[in-house]
Amino acid sequence: MATEAMREVEIFATCPQSKDVAAADYLTRVADVARWSEQAGCRGILVYTDNGLVDPWLVSQVILESTDQLAPLVAIQPVYMHPYSAAKMVTSLAYLLGRRIFLNMLAGGFKNDLVALGDETPHDERYERTVEYTRIMLDLLRGEEPVTLEGRYYNVKNLSLTPALPPELFPGVLISGSSPAGLAAAEAIGATPVKYPKPPGEENPDDHPDAFGVRVGVIARETADEAWSVALERFPEDRRGQITHRVAMSTSDSHWHKQLSDREHAGGPDAGADGEPEPYWLGPFQNYNTFCPYLVGSHARVAREIAQYVGLGCSTFILDIPPSEEELEHTGVVFREALATASS
């Protein structure tokens, strides 16, 4: 997947979730997906966190030990650990393995997970808390002076971090940017805001900062028919999943959940007016198979969609969990063509 043009765009895969893989097979599966992602030229790999998954820091250590350069994008839930502990994990992995990671700062997550932990902080206030949390983390990792912060959510005084983090291993930072509160938080901490996008033709350029990210799945083949055949086999309609989706949406206060759920058309192989169907598809999301829109179609057509996102200022793509090494190879074809188009 790697090309000269791709150095201007960072591409992340996503790590398998422990709830989807048998315990006896999980470590091997994580290592395999990490190696496929690195060989495909991905910059890193997102590692989820929630109440039902194994610890993302331990999974990230497996990823680092299985690859040479791939950077875990670790999802950090402020409710789970103090910002000092999270910063200590970053610098400890750097000290032990000499590797850089990325931070995916969370303000929310599944609402029922937060309630179970005794956290009923409102949506926008969670972003304010994440800003305080991230500032403490990043100031500790910079190591320029002891950190003191008297905030609404955290208080630290003359706090230092040892071992110090080498400057070249300072983490990249991402955060959800689907709401005004998320965009404000991204600006406050210097993070890349990531959204669950509309079709590129519906995106308003004025709604985006200079650089942003999108979370999107890709299924592409030589022809649209081949791609849709793969997509429908992988993500068939699931009545139980649709019910679960509706229940989850009824309890969620997530802006991006609502934005995707409120779309009138999910797309699909019969959605195109002329010729090849429109690539944008919400079928997997609506059947509770995954949490992002998909782009499905021929390599050339999906590449045009990706190129439009890049033209809008998208600098980061977070892909869905790859089911196979072959799928990443097809995705690589798409991105090579898309970035060649975007740079021409």
Image (cartoon, rainbow, N blue to C red):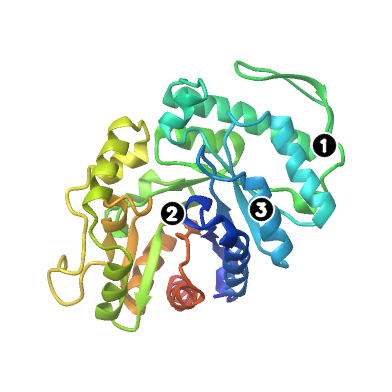
Residue at (47%, 78%) from the top-left corner?
326
The quadrant of the picture occupied by the N terminus is: bottom right
Residue beneath disc 2:
215
Depth check: 46 or 183 in front? 46
- What's the distance in space between the residues labelled 3 and 1, CA to CA? 23 Å
Give the foreground label among 3 and 1: 3
Tag 3–tag 1 contact (CB < 8 Å): no
Label 3 secondary element? helix
Residue at (37%, 44%) from the top-left corner?
207
Give the foreground label among 1 and 2: 2
Position of residue 103 relative to residue 22, above or below, is above
Residue beneath disc 1:
143
Q: Earlier in the sequence, mark 2 or mark 3?
A: 3
The quadrant of the picture occupied by the C terminus is: bottom left
- What's the distance in space between the residues labelled 2 and 3, CA to CA? 20 Å
Residue beneath disc 3:
60
Identified by mark 1, the residue type is Gly
Count how many numbered circles sit on residues in the image. Answer: 3
Q: For mark 2, does the 10 Å Cα neighbourhood hold few (<14), some (14 to 19), or many (20 or more) residues?
A: many
